[in-house]
Image: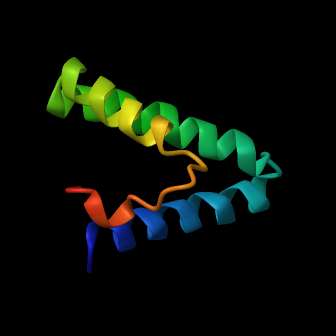
Amino acid sequence: MSKYALAKEAIAQAMAGAERTGIGQDDVLLALIVSAVADYQKLAGKAATRSALRYELDNLGGDIDTVFLRSR
């Protein structure tokens, strides 16, 4: 199983939990982002976290498909 498949599985489980408990899916996704960023910073450090987030934010809805360039 790939790292992205594992992440998608975790997101699907969180979305199912949101539906069961009546918590908004957007709130659950935000909580996942906040939690993942905090945990990633503990593992990779502040600079790597900032760099990864900047890269992802810079490519949100962009016109150029850069997915094939990602090393993650």
Q: Name which quarter of the figure residue 71 lies in.
A: bottom left
Give the quarter of the figure containing the N terminus: bottom left
Q: Nearer the viewer, residue 53 or 2?
A: 53
Residue furthest bottom in the image: 1
Give the quarter of the figure containing the C terminus: bottom left
Number of dots carrying numbers: 0
Establish if 57 lies above or below 67: above
Q: Position of residue 26 (x, y in %)?
A: 73, 45
Residue furthest right in the image: 22
Establish if 25 lies above or below 34: below
Q: Residue at x 83, y 51 (%)?
A: 22
Q: Position of residue 61 (x, y in %)?
A: 61, 50
Establish if 30 lies above or below 6: above
Judged left or right of residue 50, residue 32 is right
Q: Nearer the viewer, residue 43 or 54?
A: 54
Q: Name which quarter of the figure residue 50 lies in.
A: top left
Q: Residue at x 61, y 37 (%)?
A: 30
Q: Residue at x 38, y 62 (%)?
A: 67
Q: Nearer the viewer, residue 30 or 61?
A: 61
Judged left or right of residue 59, residue 50 is left
Q: Position of residue 38 (x, y in %)?
A: 36, 27
Establish if 35 lies above or below 72: above
